[in-house]
Image (cartoon, grey):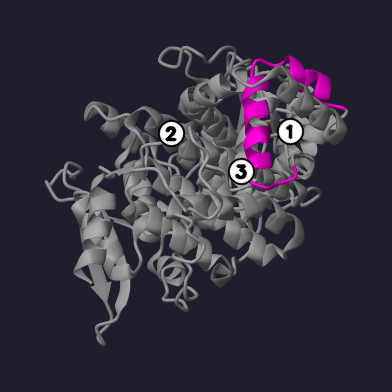
Amino acid sequence: MIAKIGKAGANTRGVLRYLYDTVRAKDHTDPHLVASFDGFAPDPGRDPDATLAQLATVLDLRVKQAGDQARDKHVWHCSVRAATEDRILSDEEWAVIARRVLNATGIAPAGDPDACRWVAVRHAGDHIHIVATKVRGDLSPPRNWNDYLRADKECAAIEKEYGLRQVVRGDRTAAKRPTRAEKEKALRAGHTATPRERLRATVRTSVAAATGTEEFFAILRSAGVLVDIQRFPSGDIRGYKVALADDTNAQGEPVWFSGSTLGPDLSYPKISERLAPTEPAPTGWHSSSRRTAWQQVTDAADRIPDVLDQADDAVGQAHITVLAETLDALPLITPASHRPQLAQAAAAFERASRSRIRARHQQAQSTRRAIKAIVREPAPKDGALLAILLDALLLAVVAAQHWHHTRHHDQQAEAARQAAEHLHAAYQAAASQPLTVIQQRGLRLAVTVQRRQAAIVHQALPDLAEQILTEPGWPTLAATLTDAQKAGHDPTVLLTEATRRRELDTAASISDVLVWRLRRSAHLPATPHDLPTRGSGRTPPATPAAQPAARAASDSTRRR
């Protein structure tokens, strides 16, 4: 059940005219009162002698008495709507709900003889409209501060008591939604997304790619965004605004958005905190480990479930934030065929990246460095590296969903679930070809080798063994177990670790998922044709990234 409180108005009769209209509003049927402040208000819907003017006069009585003391915007309007799958509530039930909402918001506290005058109109089966005039009996204004949150909390209680659908609720950390006018303007211009949404995605991607605030602004400009930087008298940056060249107002001027209006975490102070210089990476951070940036990001994503399970909330929130940055950066450097699903995953997870918990960003800076490195590092030709990374990210997103769920962050948990669906689709597309390559090697294994690998699976995963051995992906897993043994690993230990606290319920093929986890944990080549010796550090050849933001970030690094 959702309560939506509109902006205060000045025309009581105008609001009533809309509520009782059945000509222009085709979905309005049988408009009538279900309740009123005293139970005797005239009802133009059921009483042929009653008029809208009479009802407006009754509601405006105290407004007229207050004269100049009354506020110009004195009309309070709230719609309360049930979910489409909920049962049809009776007029009597809606009357009780209206009184509860009015009591919770402070417009008409229960038992208060001086409460504001109000009526509840029903013109459809699934919702009512409450109209009140904000002048009390003593001619003072009501104390309805924070009425939206109070109404929302009361609706949540009503849902449980009436057995209605329990709506996912937020914590006021969501980005501002585009207005109806913005949506209609975008459609007229031929865009599916509003300027606000397009700018939010561009700013988030630029933050993920940039290594500092100056580079952040440079990347924005390279992406065709207009940037206006505000400064203090000292010259220090105070904030910024962004606009699209093709989004103008009636005077032909750009429509500007400050960072904070795009998202609570996109204000300049929040961005500068994430981009603040940190201690340099340890000596040999890149060279001694011989791990590419892609592999380092994969390693970091693989650690996130354990971090969320063990670390305090501030550190957990920091790693969820950096997980969102990883998803934001991926569409820059992945093949075009994968970008739509990855962009949708990033857009969905945007809501999951924030909560009321303040992130301790310094705890995730090593991962942030690796993310910025993959934007500057040539993208690998081997699609298996992308599949391995997406599998690790999918596990991390599922872990983030669980983390939010246990903390009752309902909207964030739902956003993470949606992001996981898009990631799963992208993973399946990326994994298809490299899995086929490994499968062909598995099919060529000797029967004795396959039997030996099957015995290992039975020993390590007795509950899953029969399912795994009958899957089409079993030869692929058998080849991977063979590679692990050749590299000096114990495959039983690897299998046990791969399934420890790891989500497999959504896997269409357990064997396929285990392939990437084993290759990741054992640092095996993604799709080996000739398994290199341990420590060779050989990495696949690469192709350059093609997106403007990636090029701008790379150019900026070279200039420095």
Q: Viewer-nearest of labels 2 and 3? A: 2
Q: Residues within 10 Å of mark 1 (few under 14, many from 20)?
A: some
Magenta stretch, residue numbers: 463-490
For this rendering, which residue is in front, 38 or 495?
A: 495
* Position of residue 220 in the picture relative to residue 203 (left or right): left
- Circles 1 and 2: CB distance less than 8 Å? no
Magenta span includes 552: no
Image location (x, y in percent) of residue 527: 50, 34
Residue drawn at x 39%, y 39% is 179
Q: Viewer-nearest of labels 1 and 3? A: 3
Q: Main secondary structure of the magenta part?
A: helix
* Position of residue 556 in the picture relative to residue 319 (left or right): left
For the residue labelled by badge 3, is the local secondary structure a helix, a strand or a loop?
helix
- Chain-order first, disc 2 or disc 3: 2
Vertical side of 502 occupied by 83: above or below: above
Asked whether residue 169 appears in the rendered view, the answer is no
- Chain-order first, disc 1 or disc 3: 1
- The residue wearing badge 2 is 383
* Position of residue 93 in the picture relative to residue 301 (left or right): right
Residue drawn at x 57%, y 43% is 524
Which quadrant does the C terminus fall into? bottom left
- The residue wearing badge 3 is 397
Image location (x, y in percent) of residue 166: 74, 33
Label count reads: 3
Q: Viewer-nearest of labels 1 and 2? A: 2
Q: Amino acid at mark 2?
A: Gly
